Amino acid sequence: PRRYLTKSFPCILQYFEHGDTAATSSRDGDGDAGSRADDVDDDRILLEIGCGSGSSCIPIIKRCSEMDHGFEGGAKRKRVLLACDSSPVAVETTRRFVERMMGEDGVAKPRDFAFGAFVADPSLIE
């Protein structure tokens, strides 16, 4: 797995854990660098394009599970990790890898967390 990913890009986990939207606040279009007040309860969705074997998904899921350890109460938002690839084989490999990790490898599924993998092949668009 890509162990460096969450160390090199801590903003990924900050987005899931704290709802830090400083990097995404420009989507409001008003030029205000502050986050929207309703972002606190928004779902957090992360899309990995070109998931390959799923090696980028694993450290994110593991860290989300670790963040939940010892957490009391319910989360205010749902965290969704989506993975897509143009190869059906890559998508199936990612699904199996994630299922095995959360099953046999004993990593607890994070709270209020959903994972999905799908084929997205732009060459099929007419």
Image: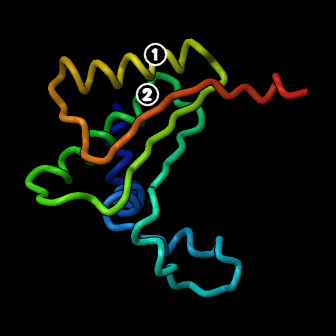
Residue 93 marker:
1
Provide residue 58's location: percent of width, then percent of height: 33, 34
Provide residue 112's location: percent of width, then percent of height: 31, 47
Residue 123 marker:
none
Name of the residue lying farthest toward the right? 126
Which residue is drawn at the image coordinates 40% and 61% (left, top)? 15
Camera-nearest residue between 74 and 8: 74
Along the horizontal axis of the image, is 92 left or right of 9?
A: right
Specify few, some or many for label 1: CA neighbours under 10 Å numbering under 14, 14-19, or 20 or more. Answer: some
Q: Secondary structure at mark 2?
A: loop
Residue placed under numbered mark 2 in the picture: 54
Q: Amino acid at mark 2?
A: Gly
Identify whether 111 is placed above or below 30. above
Q: Amino acid at mark 1?
A: Thr
Q: State how many labels appear.
A: 2
Which residue is drawn at the image coordinates 65% and 76% (left, top)? 28
Identify whether 119 is placed above or below 69. above
Provide residue 71's location: percent of width, then percent of height: 13, 57
Q: Secondary structure at mark 1?
A: helix
Determine the image quadrant of residue 24: bottom right
Camera-nearest residue between 118 and 85: 118
**For the residues bearing labels 2 and 1, Cβ distance under 8 angstroms:** yes
Specify few, some or many for label 2: CA neighbours under 10 Å numbering under 14, 14-19, or 20 or more. Answer: many
Which residue is drawn at the image coordinates 45% and 56% (left, top)? 44
Along the horizontal axis of the image, is 68 left or right of 24?
A: left
The quarter of the picture where the C terminus appears is top right
